[in-house]
Image (cartoon, helix red, strand yellow):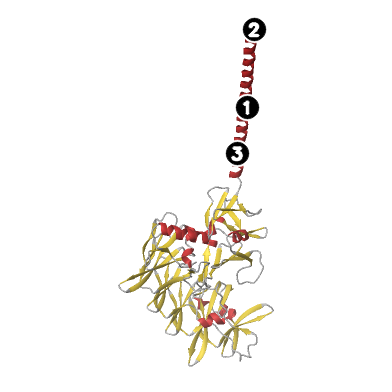
Amino acid sequence: MNEFDRVASKKNEAKEKKKKMLLTGIVICVIIIIALAVMIIYYQHVDATTFKVFIDDEQMQYSEGFYFTNEAGETYVRARDIANYIGWSYQNGEYGAYTEDLNSGYIQSEYEIVSFVAGSNVLKKYIQVIAQPYFDEFGTEIQPYQANSANGTLETTTLALPIISQEGQIYFPLRNLNDICNCSIRYDDPYRMYIYEQKYLITLAQTNAAQFGYQSISGTYENMRLLPYGMMVVSNGSLFGVVDLYGGQGIIGLKYTDMVFAQNVKEFFVKTYANNEESIGIINAQGTQVVAPKNYGSIQVLSDQLGLYLVEKDGEYGVLNRSGEVVVHCEYDEIGIPEEVLDTFNFGVEDNKYLLFNDTIVVKDDGKYGLYNIEGDQTLTAAYEGFGYLVTEDEDAIRNSENVLTIELDDLELSDGSTRDVKAIIVQRIENGVKKYGVYDAVSERLILPCNYNRIFSLTSKGTTEYYIEFEGQRAKFSDQLAAYPSIFE
């Protein structure tokens, strides 16, 4: 081999070596790329299958036990954590109870208070809006949202699922957060929980309403509680309607002079104005008319659980049911328990001031009181001065006696061997200037003891309460009197 061939051979060997090195480098790069891709896919999978909580699209750090899913597939979230995430406060014990009971509690925002008990699916909600206009940092006057109802108004809301207690903590059903604390929920991905709180939804509604061509959203606080259900009340300046929060599609026409969303019954009270007369009706959240606008001056919920509404027309009051049927015609001066009775017998905001035993409607006509059942039957003529017996200070003959408004007896054994439940209401009449007392029974829906009695009172001794009636100085046990005469119930 000559020198030329030797040089050429060395050059070829060098080229082959470079080729091998290049191929080796390519293979290594491919391996590294594949390894990186595998790592990326792995970490993406880990990230995608790691549970995360987002509040208003911002990821939140949550602690162990924040949520769990039961055997039925329902997810629950810890109430205290949710309150903290959305800017509400949390307290142990029902609102107004002044206890530290771990099986009950309440959460509070600047707008409302929500009280609850573990094991129950019924909430108590109190609207607390007492906001005055204020100025922001730029000197612009801000008009806060105002409640349509009186401050402190109590509502009861029934959830689809109960609130529960687990290991000393209260848990809310996730899918009912819109009812509980006015949050919108997105949980279609089992590893992602998106919660949008009320202030975020208000800002979104204001932005979307403008984009959809509406002048504004309603400034009534009750209507802000519609937003978690994907709807908003909008206005063109003089008329109101309801549209989809995200797409702007119409749900209730823009033709009402006012409308207020009642969250507890998921209905709207709407006002119209025609022929120089204002009318009020009810429309449900699906846009279906429940009660056609009629010449009522006002409508409000009398009982959300019973589906009853208090209506006013020309200064007189009546009651409608959820089908729009008249239960009590608008011909009474007042509907509800007299104020003096509410005060005397310590009715609280939790008590329904329109009903006794939650099934007997109190009416007042020309200064006299009567009763209706919830089916609309008048069961006691409006001919009575009032309700309840009030012990006077000079009744020394009845030491330690107590006021009585109602008496409830279960399975009272009568002299004929039968038993009967009794839900008694003490009624008053004045004859010849003297107040006398009788007893109406809400079970048999009749006056079972006439207004002949001087006193109907209770005595409590050693923790046991017994009820008595007194006629012309003769005293008898209330239960004995009823038991002796079964025919009074017929």
- Work out which residue is located at the far top of the displayed protein and give it: 1
Which residue is at the front of the view, 223 or 165?
223
Determine the image quadrant of residue 99: bottom right
Circle 2 residues within 10 Å: few <14, some 14–19, many ≥20: few
Mark 3: amino acid: Ile
Mark 2: amino acid: Asn
Mark 1 or mark 2, which has the lower sequence index? Answer: 2
Task: Provide residue 98's location: percent of width, then percent of height.
Answer: 64, 72
Does residue 437 appear in the picture of this structure?
A: yes
Q: Secondary structure at mark 3?
A: helix
Mark 1: amino acid: Gly
Determine the image quadrant of residue 476: bottom right
Q: Viewer-nearest of labels 1 and 3?
A: 1
Q: Which residue is mark 3?
A: 40
Q: Which residue is mark 1?
A: 25
Q: Which residue is mark 2?
A: 2
